Image: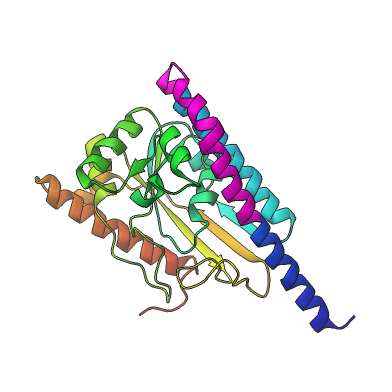
Amino acid sequence: MSRTFLERFDHGWRLIATGAAFVGFGTCGVLFSVLVFPFAWLWPHRASRQAAVSTVIHWFFRALVAMLQVIGVMKLDVSGVAALRARGPAVVVANHPTYLDVMVLLSLTPRACCVVKNAHWGNPCFWGIVRAAEYVSNADPAELIEAGARQLEKGYTMIVFPEGTRSPGGDRLHPFSRGFAHMALKAGIPIRPVLIDCDPPAFTKQMRWYHVPTRPFTMRIAVLEPLALDALAGDDASPALAARTVTHAVQAHITEHLFVYGFFKTRN
C-alpha cells in the first residue's frame, strides 16, 4: 500500500469515527432528556439530585473522551489537573478554541456546573441535561451572577468561557464578559485560569465537524495557579469597577500565558 492510500484511509476512518461520535453524543443527549430528566425531577432531595446528575455527566464525558482517544480521533495532554479534581468551590475561567472544550473540562472536573448559552435550553440534545444539572443560563446577567454564586456556595466548580463563543483564532481572544468576575467577587472565591489548545485546529468557529485534520488532534489543557481577588481588584470600592478590573486582569493573564505555554505562537 502506498503512503497516500494509508493517509486517505486514516483520514476516512477518523471522519467516520468523528461522525459516529457526534451522532452517539446527540442520541445520548436526547435519551437523557426524554428518559432520565423526568425521573430526576421526581427525586425528592434537590441537592442529592444535582450531585447525582453531575456525576453521571462527568463519567459520561470521561467515557466519551476515552473513546475518542482509543479510536484515534484525538489525544489529550493535561497539566495541573489535580486542581480540577480537588473538592471545594472554584471559578474556572478558560479560553474557548473548540467545540469540545466544555466536554473535556467536564470530563476532568467531577463536581462542576457550567454557564451555558440560553439557546441550549431549547436544544433537543441539551435541554434536559442543562435543567437537571442546574447549569446557569447566560440570558440574564443579573441572574447569572446570583445563580453562579449559589452554585459556588454549594461547593461546585463553576466553569465559565467568558468569550461567550468560540475564540476567533489567529492567536486572539474575544473580549471577556464580566459575569465571572461579579460571580467570584460575590462569593469570595479565587479564580483559576485554564488554558486550552487544539493542535492541529479542529471544531473551531470556522470549521464544521467534517473538517477533520490530517492527523489526530491533541487537546492540551493547562491548569494555572489560582488568582486572588484582592490582588486583582486592588482597592476598588465599587463592585462594577472591581469586576471590570478583575476581568481585564484575568484576560491579560490568560493571554500572556497562552504565549508562554506556546498555545499562541506570535504576538499581534
Q: Nearer the viewer, residue 122 or 209?
A: 122
Q: Determine whether, in the image, residue 153 is placed left or right of residue 8.
A: left
Q: Nearer the viewer, residue 93 or 192?
A: 93
Image: 17 above or below 179: below
Check the picture and name the quadrant holding the N terminus: bottom right
Q: Main secondary structure of the magenta part?
A: helix
Q: Which residues are magenta?
A: 21-47
Check the picture and name the quadrant holding the C terminus: bottom left
**Which residue is drawn at the image coordinates 44% and 52% (left, top)?**
224
| Residue 251 painted magenta | no
Q: Nearer the viewer, residue 216 or 249?
A: 216
Image: 33 above or below 69: above
Residue 122 makes an appearance in the image: yes
**Residue 264 place in picture, x, y as percent:** 46, 72
Examine the image and state in which quarter residue 14 appears.
bottom right
**Residue 24 place in picture, x, y as percent:** 64, 50
Q: Determine whether, in the image, residue 76 is placed left or right of residue 236.
A: right
For this orientation, the residue located farthest to the left is 237
